[in-house]
Amino acid sequence: IQTIIFLSGAIGLLWVLPILRNKGYSGKSIILIGLITTAIALGSFTFLAKGWEVYIASLGLAFSAVLFPVARALLSRALGAETRPTMLAAYGSLEVLAAVVSPLMFPNLYSLVQPVKFGLFDLLTLGPGVVFLIATGVLLVACVIAGTLPKT
């Protein structure tokens, strides 16, 4: 699965990002597209029933690799030469913090959640996959925040 995620991210960076830039999409639009498609892909993991479905859902993570480089480019453009190094260092620190905290937090949440059945005939079961809904919620909050950014 990691290979599929890596390959879809590479496709996003090397193929999709240049196409969007050539079509005139702003950095803000690309970030919003990346956040929304990543949220949809992660949210779909909640409802997967078969192992092969994970591979298909992972393809939706193609834009996740685009988010950090585009955000760094936007910061570089928006900041003056005096504040740029400090802000990029802070941004890099937040990236590393997220990369450290997420793997520690989400597996523990995953193991704590017990399956719960919903619906008239228990058609929907939410179990440990609800962690992916939490991650989707975090991404949707990021979408709201990114929506307030100026168009660049």
Image (cartoon, rainbow, N blue to C red):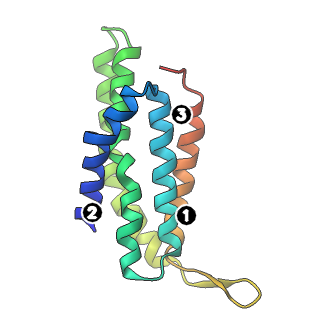
Identified by mark 2, the residue type is: Ile
Residue at x 36% of width, y 78% of height: 52
Residue at x 57% of width, y 48% of height: 140
Q: Which mark is residue 146?
A: 3
Q: Quadrant of residue 61?
A: bottom left
Residue at x 31% of width, y 20% of height: 86
5 sits left or right of 44 in the view: left
Disc with the residue nearer the chain's start (3 vs 2): 2
Q: Helix, strand, or loop for circle 2?
A: helix
x and y percentages locating residue 11 in the rendered image? 28, 48
Q: Helix, strand, or loop for circle 1?
A: helix
x and y percentages locating residue 49 in the rendered image? 48, 82
Which residue has dot 2 on it? 4
Quarter of the figure with the N terminus:
bottom left
Q: Which of the pair 96/41 is nearer the observer? A: 41
Q: Residues within 10 Å of mark 3 (few under 14, many from 20)?
A: some
35 sits left or right of 107 in the view: right
Identified by mark 3, the residue type is: Ala
Q: Which mark is residue 133?
A: 1
Identified by mark 1, the residue type is: Leu
Vertical relation: 65 (above or below) 23: below
Instruction: Determine contact: label 3, label 2, CB under 8 Å.
Output: no
Q: Residues within 10 Å of mark 1 (few under 14, many from 20)?
A: many
Residue at x 55% of width, y 41% of height: 143
Q: Helix, strand, or loop for circle 3?
A: helix
Vertical relation: 69 (above or below) 79: below
